[in-house]
Every structure is written in C-alpha cells, then in structure tokens.
Image: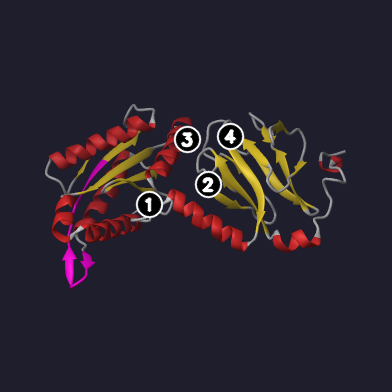
Amino acid sequence: MSDWDEVTQTELEIISAADAVRRTHAYLVVITGPGVGTMHKLPVDGAVIGRSQTADLRLAEDGVSRAHARIRPIERRMMLEDLGSRNGTFLNGQRIERPAALADGDKVQIGRGTVLRFSYHDSLDESFHEQMLQSALRDSTTKLYNKRYFLDRLDGEIKFSRRHHSALSVLMVDIDHFKQVNDRFGHVAGDTVLANVAQMIGRSVRNEDVVARFGGEEIAIILRAIELGPALLLADRVRRVVATSATALPDDKQVHVTVSVGVASLPDLAVETVAELVDAADQALYRAKHAGRDRVSR
C-alpha cells in the first residue's frame, strides 16, 4: 500500500461549496527566513520546493535540500510530502513521515529557518497582500527594494555562492555631488533625480539582479553568478547610461548627474559575511570617489 493510499477519509473531505467559491487559489507566504513576506501562488498541479534552480519554489537557504518537499492536489485537498530531505519537513511543528493534508493557516517549516504559511486567497486578498508586501520591501521614493530586503537577500546569496563555489558580485553606486542638486533645485527635485537614476540602473541590469536603495543617494546591486570581470563591465555600463542621460524637471529644466561605482566579488575576495562583502564594495566606491568620481573601481 502506498503512502497516498493511507490518507484518511477525513483528510480527503470535500471543501464546502461556500468555501470553494472564495478559496480560488492556494498560496505559500514566507513568514520567517529569506524573502520574508513573499507570497507564492501555487500552480494548480502542485509544486516542488527546494534549493535547486529547477524547483518551482526555490529557497536559497542552508538546510534546504535540492528537492526538499512537494505540495500537490489529491481529490480536493492540497497534500504536503517530504521528498527524502536531509533535515525533514515539518507541519505545525511536527515532522511528517507521510503525505499530510494542508489546512488554511498551517505552517510548513523547510530547512533550518524558513517557515511558510499555507493559505487560500481570492484575487482581492492577493492584491491587498501584494500592496502590503511592496510597502514593506520597497523604498517609497525610488520603488527599488529597501536596505533590509537587500541585506536579507545578500545573506542567502553568499551562502549559496559558498555552497556551490559560484561567483557573486555586489555593486555600490553613489550619485556624485548629490548635495549640490538638492541645494540648487530643492529636495523635491532631488527625489525626482534619484528616482530617475534608480530607473536607469534598473533597466541596465538583468531581471534576476537585485537593485536596492541602500541609503541616501546610494544604490546597491546583487549580481548572482557574475564574476569580477563581467561585473566591472556592467558597472561601467551603468555609469555610462547615467552620464549620458538627464532628468527632466518643471519649467523645461534638466539635471545631468554622474555616478561612481564600487565593485566587490566572490571568489575574488576572501570574505564570508554580508558585512565584509558590503564593506569591500563600499571601500571600492570610496576609491572611485577619491580618484575623481564618474568612474568604476574594484
């Protein structure tokens, strides 16, 4: 008899018609661990959760196996199944040994520190959650990710890089003489310039790259699987895009700014923590500023 044959009738009970009208889609929401707050809509035929890049829901965290667990429908219930993971899959604090039915609000622990909440939502719930998530993770001026999200993601990416011996680069971008922009045109205009530069940078990198406002006029970028050489080329492309563009202001005014960029990469540097890698990129940025601005340094 298979594990699926052992599922009890209670676990397979049909959802009431009233609930079925509202429970349009099943979701997993990250409540602790990398990407906290992120809402993942589960495909109707289920999803594999794991560290592998081929996983439907990828978790770049220590303790997560490549194919860790699976959620798939049976009858009218979504069932959670461990796929022989190293550290096990836990449902509401209990390690599961066979497929278990998921109920609205259940908590699923994957690996050592990632906890997901399983829930059903309709389109209005999804829209509201997305708005709340964007508010929590995004900077209001630039619409880029905020510093907290950047540091959280960078921690996961460093661990992934060390585990798989893959490259990882961080760019720190700072607008040159930004105080002069605020002093001459005002802070509202300064925010417009900052937001426009942020958009330029966002269009200059890959969709999978993480671009965040690190603080003030400083923007940070995570480049997964990019070594030092290509990272320097991309950094210079960012520099040239900003230098050759302008921000339009009211009364037909235009503001031209430049940026300096610092680049730090693994495995080029023997660093192991988020603080060390960010500090290395900051030191490179300082060298670019000290050398005359509007340039890239490593």
Q: Main secondary structure of the magenta part?
A: strand
Which comes sooner in the sequence, label 2 or label 1?
Answer: 2
Which labelled disc corresponds to residue 37? 2
Discs 2/3, front: 2
Q: Amino acid at mark 1?
A: Asp
According to the picture, the residue beneath numbered tag 3 turns out to be: 160
Which labelled disc corresponds to residue 139? 1
According to the picture, the residue beneath numbered tag 4 turns out to be: 64
Which comes sooner in the sequence, label 2 or label 4?
Answer: 2
Discs 1/4, front: 1
Q: Which residues are magenta?
A: 247-262
Rate crowding at label 1 as few (under 14), some (14 to 19) or many (20 or more) other CA atoms within 10 Å. Answer: some
- Name of the residue lying farthest toward the left: 292
Identify the secondary structure beneath mark 1. Answer: loop
Q: Amino acid at mark 2?
A: Gly
Discs 2/4, front: 2
Q: Is residue 256 visible?
A: yes
Q: Please give the name of the residue rendered at 18% of the width and 37% of the height, measured from the top-left corner.
A: 287
Give the alpha-carbon distance from disc 2 to disc 3, as whole Å: 20 Å
Please state which of residues 80 and 218 is positioned toward the viewer in this rendering.
218
Residue 292 image position (x, y, % from top left)? 11, 44
Please state which of residues 44 and 8 is positioned toward the viewer in this rendering.
8
Q: For residue 189, which quarter of the picture?
A: bottom left
Q: Amino acid at mark 4?
A: Val
Question: Residues at badges 2 and 1 in contact (C-beta under 8 Å)?
Answer: no
Please, is residue 108 above or below residue 130 in the view? above
Give the alpha-carbon distance from disc 1 to disc 4, as whole Å: 30 Å
